[in-house]
Image (cartoon, helix red, strand yellow):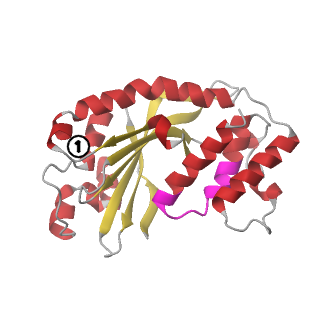
Amino acid sequence: MLKRNFIQVGNDLNKAIAFANTLDNNNILNVQRIKQKEFYIPTLDVVSKLQNEGWQINSVAEQRGKGRKIAHNFVRLQHPDFAIKNNKGKDEALLSLTVTNSCNGSKPINLEMGMYRLICSNGAVRFDEAAETQKIKHTEINYKNLDQYLNIVNRKSSLVLNEFEKLKHSNLSVKEMRELAYEAAKLRYNDISNINIDDILAVNRIEDEGNDLWTVFNRIQENLTSTVNNASDDILLNKQLFALAETFA
């Protein structure tokens, strides 16, 4: 169960820790009383290095495990130098990086790249996992070589941005838009017999008008994920939605 959904913190590290207490490793050890692997890599070690490369904290979240203790924390970052522009030349979306870390080190740190759309509160979207997920296990050698892993992520930034740009140059027919929405709905709901496809394609703001794949995808993504309250489920659904959208490019 999610302690809180992603909460905006405006690149304020103190605010990030206030809303996601386990970003402070002392909280994990002394408050949560969770035993960690010997060479545990704290989330903030990763985040601080990314900040040195121009990444800015956007939002944070925590997720409880079966024992009610916090099992995972999440930090979503953006990079202002990697942006998709709208037709007026203004930033529409920024490259996004979501850092997911287990509090005990039992699972690798995941760094998952996508785009964060500035005009909607839940606008982060993702590639399929194989394309841009960097996994870092909690080991001594990985702790020492953390900079090398993060350099790989930074080098991928331009490539990932280009993949998202491709969506803007693919136009869909009405039939294709409805087909995309139908297939997307099947990823979100077990039973779609009572789902209105028009609701999934609904335009919520003037910026969402258009029939290019990027715009249609973002309408579908926002309408389907707005009620997802679990950070892990949100990440998985966004990956699946983007993988589906790519097949229409």
The residue under the point 69% across, 52% down is 184
62 horizontally vs 207: left or right = left
- Res. 97 image quadrant: top left
Q: Which residue is mark 1?
A: 45
Determine whether 38 is above or below 133 in the image. below
Quadrant containing the C terminus in the rendered view:
top right
Number of marks in picture:
1
- Between 203 and 148, the one nearer to me in the picture: 148
Quadrant containing the N terminus in the rendered view:
bottom left
The residue under the point 15% across, 48% down is 39
- Between 133 and 28, the one nearer to me in the picture: 133
- Give the residues drawn in magenta, as a range: 220-233
Q: Main secondary structure of the magenta part?
A: helix
- Please, which residue is most extreme toward the bottom here? 67
Residue 248: say if magenta: no
Q: Amino acid at mark 1?
A: Asp
Horizontal and vertical percent position of residue 209: 78, 40
The residue under the point 61% across, 59% down is 226
